[in-house]
């Protein structure tokens, strides 16, 4: 026999932004404020189940108890974040760019009760009478009086490297691909990054009365001020409100042929996605309307349909995720282009936030206008749809215009983005590394290459420290404790390779030590965002670069024109006796030999543009096996 949901009145004078501050210190709190569940607020904490990283988050949405609605509107259910890269569960996609700060692909938890503000009063809603009785007194006490806000700080938000120059280059390349018929549209994004201290709940409470978002949300370090509904399912009826087309002036937006074309493509995409799981002939698309959101205007349409009797929420998500308005058309090809052209990995951004309830159905927003916080870092993704006639400068301006509203609402600072390098004449004629193969696949594991001389590994501690740091960040695991012993058992001279799998198992290989080959000059390859700060076991792209470079050394260069590293070594230049190496800013591997040279005072970090690199007095390379060695000087590079 199914349980019966209930609701109990809570006498409280608090506004949602006052009430949500009581969630500080609670276990896995969430706050949804805006149009959720008909309007008002949903707050909760203390889930009865937390999804594990290896569980299928889409399947979990259908794992609901049998509950009679009673008088509750929502009662409980799965609440959380579905990150953009969950699209990899649906389509075969190439690995994406590096993650400056890693975050879980999904964060879901099941709550058997919550409190709801319906615009007039507060209610405790629970999935049965016993659960309500257990929590009623606690919530009455919490909501009796306001909680004092606590201070938080957000540093200056700036695009991390390759910054604005990288975005301009990505837009330019995307326009070229569209002209060549590869796709019709792709949504390209730029990340703004800063330091953060405080509690995300205080940032959210501060932003709410200023932004008044349609779909405000705060959970698991994500503070979203989204204007866009992704999906709402009530019974068998499904709706989506895709946004595409943005301008500061509503008249200009209404007259823009470019924005209208973007909007039509995305509406058609959503019609197609919903058509996969909705009854034949039930799909409808309303005429587009103008809506104002956080200092900009958008074109919005409602696309609706009737979900087939045999389809559940998991089927609905697999048919539609990620949202079409933040990917492009055709969707799968647009996602492949995004993986190649963007310089930093998307996390929660451009995924979805919301709930799946046994009573209320499904409701999800598109995760845009959203701050993400991990540790002492905060970032915000902004972007826009690129079409055939897109102008890179105008697209950058649109992205930054979208950023201005959320930043003004959520922070205490005057927002300013420092203008960086603009044109990239030296990168336009480069070969694109990703034309040779995809980025390394993190699923294939991490790698450490360690030098053993006379049965000793002098840099062993540094290598194991780096491996452990990467393992924690990438997989949330620790390497086996016996690695040092296993490597220490290698006799004589050897090149030791440690391959750490995602499940925590490690393989130690010993190979004959041979002198490194010296190649002549350098062959630059463009790789947005570089290979990142982890050393991957997947070396296919490294090998493809070496094969393509032939007698030259492959040199990775980012879209801002800055030199990063070679396919297997850190690089240095000698300027009047001073050794300079590219900054370890998340785009390059922080080599152990490189770190030793810097620690000994033998060099400094610096931004090094390609022309400066090639004109240097001397060029040197550092790697774990070869140490510090001079490369033949280069006066130019192949223009193949």
Image (cartoon, rainbow, N blue to C red):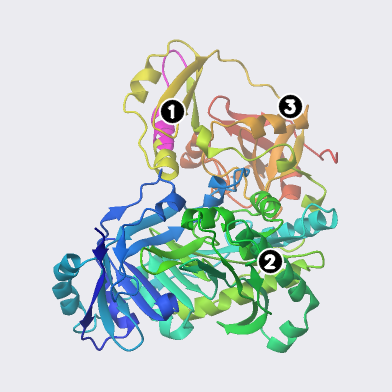
Residue 40 visible in the current orientation: yes
Residue 266 badge: 2
Label 1 and label 2: CA atoms lie apart by: 53 Å
Looking at the image, residue 238 sits to the left or right of residue 522; the answer is left
Q: Is residue 175 magenta?
A: no
Would you say residue 198 is visible in this rendering? no
Quarter-wise, where is residue 204 in the image?
bottom left
Spatial separation of the CA atoms under disc 1 and disc 3: 26 Å
Residue 200 in picture, x, y percent from top left: 37, 69
Q: In the rendered structure, does residue 454 fall within the stretch colored magenta?
A: yes
- First in sequence: mark 1 vs mark 2: 2
Distance from the alpha carbon under mark 3 to that under mark 2: 49 Å
Q: As drawn, is 77 to the left or to the right of 350? A: left
Q: Are marks 3 and 2 in contact (CB under 8 Å)?
A: no
Report the residue at 64% width, 56% height from top.
162
Q: Which mark is residue 459?
A: 1
Task: Give SS at disc 1.
Answer: loop
| Residue at the spot 49% in from the left edge and 66% down from the top edge | 236
Say if mark 1 contacts mark 2, CB within 8 Å.
Answer: no
Which x, y percent locates residue 343? 62, 53
Which residue is tagged 3? 519
């Amino acid at each position: 026999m199914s349980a019966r949901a209930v609701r109990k009145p809570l006498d409280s004078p608090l506004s949602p932004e006052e009430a949500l501050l009581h969630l500080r210190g609670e276990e896995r709190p969430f706050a949804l404020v805006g149009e959720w569940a008909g309007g008002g607020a949903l707050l909760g904490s203390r889930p009865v189940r937390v999804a594990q990283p290896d569980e299928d988050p889409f399947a979990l949405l259908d794992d609901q108890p049998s509950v009679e609605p009673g008088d509750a509107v929502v009662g409980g259910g799965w609440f959380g974040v579905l990150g953009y890269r969950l699209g990899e569960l649906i389509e075969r996609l190439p690995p994406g760019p590096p993650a400056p700060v890693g975050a879980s692909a999904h964060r879901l938890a099941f709550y058997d009760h919550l409190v709801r503000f319906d615009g007039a009063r507060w209610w405790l809603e629970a999935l049965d009478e016993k659960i309500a009785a257990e929590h009623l007194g606690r919530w009455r006490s919490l909501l009796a009086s306001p909680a004092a806000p606590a201070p938080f700080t957000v540093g200056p938000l700036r695009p991390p490297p390759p910054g604005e120059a990288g975005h301009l280059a990505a837009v330019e390349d995307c326009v070229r691909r569209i002209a060549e018929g590869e796709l019709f549209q792709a949504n390209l994004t730029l990340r703004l990054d800063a330091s953060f201290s405080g509690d995300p709940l205080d940032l959210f409470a501060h932003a709410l009365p200023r932004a008044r978002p349609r779909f405000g949300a705060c959970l698991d370090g994500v503070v979203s001020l989204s204007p866009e509904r992704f999906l709402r399912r009530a019974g068998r009826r499904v709706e989506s409100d895709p946004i595409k087309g943005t301008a500061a002036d509503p008249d200009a937006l209404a007259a823009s042929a470019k924005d209208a074309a973007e909007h039509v493509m995305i509406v058609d995409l959503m019609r197609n996605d919903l058509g996969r799981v909705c009854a034949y002939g039930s799909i409808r698309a309303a005429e587009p309307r103008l809506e104002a959101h956080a200092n900009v205007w958008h074109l919005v349409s409602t696309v609706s349909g009737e979900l087939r009797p045999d389809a559940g929420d998991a089927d609905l998500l697999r048919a539609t995720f990620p949202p079409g308005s933040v990917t492009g058309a055709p969707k799968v090809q647009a996602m492949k282009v995004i993986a190649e052209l963007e310089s930093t990995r998307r996390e929660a951004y451009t995924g979805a936030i919301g709930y799946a309830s046994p009573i209320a159905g499904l409701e999800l927003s598109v995760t845009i206008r959203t701050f993400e916080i991990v540790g002492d870092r905060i970032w915000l993704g902004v972007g826009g749809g690129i079409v055939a006639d897109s102008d890179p400068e105008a697209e950058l301006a649109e992205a930054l215009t979208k950023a201005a509203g959320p930043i003004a609402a959520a922070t205490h600072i005057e927002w300013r983005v420092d203008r960086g390098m603009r044109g990239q004449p030296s990168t336009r004629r480069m070969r694109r590394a990703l034309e040779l193969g995809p980025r390394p696949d993190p699923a294939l594991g991490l790698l450490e290459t360690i030098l053993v001389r006379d049965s000793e590994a002098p840099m062993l501690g540094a290598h194991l420290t780096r491996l452990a740091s990467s393992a924690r960040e990438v997989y949330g695991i620790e390497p086996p404790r016996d690695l040092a012993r296993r490597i220490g058992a290698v006799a004589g001279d050897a090149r030791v390779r440690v391959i750490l799998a995602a499940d925590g198992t490690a393989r130690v290989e010993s190979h004959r030590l041979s002198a490194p080959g010296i190649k002549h000059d350098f062959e630059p390859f463009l790789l947005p965002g570089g290979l990142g700060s982890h050393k991957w076991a997947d070396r296919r792209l490294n090998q493809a670069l070496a094969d393509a470079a032939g007698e030259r050394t492959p040199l990775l260069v980012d879209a801002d024109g800055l030199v990063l590293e070679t396919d297997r070594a850190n690089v240095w230049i000698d300027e009047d006796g001073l050794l300079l190496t590219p900054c370890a800013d998340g785009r390059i591997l922080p080599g152990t030999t490189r770190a030793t040279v810097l620690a000994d005072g033998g060099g400094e970090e610096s931004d090094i543009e390609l022309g400066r690199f090639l004109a240097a007095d001397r060029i040197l390379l550092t790697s774990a096996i070869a140490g510090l060695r001079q490369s033949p000087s280069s006066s130019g590079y192949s223009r193949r």
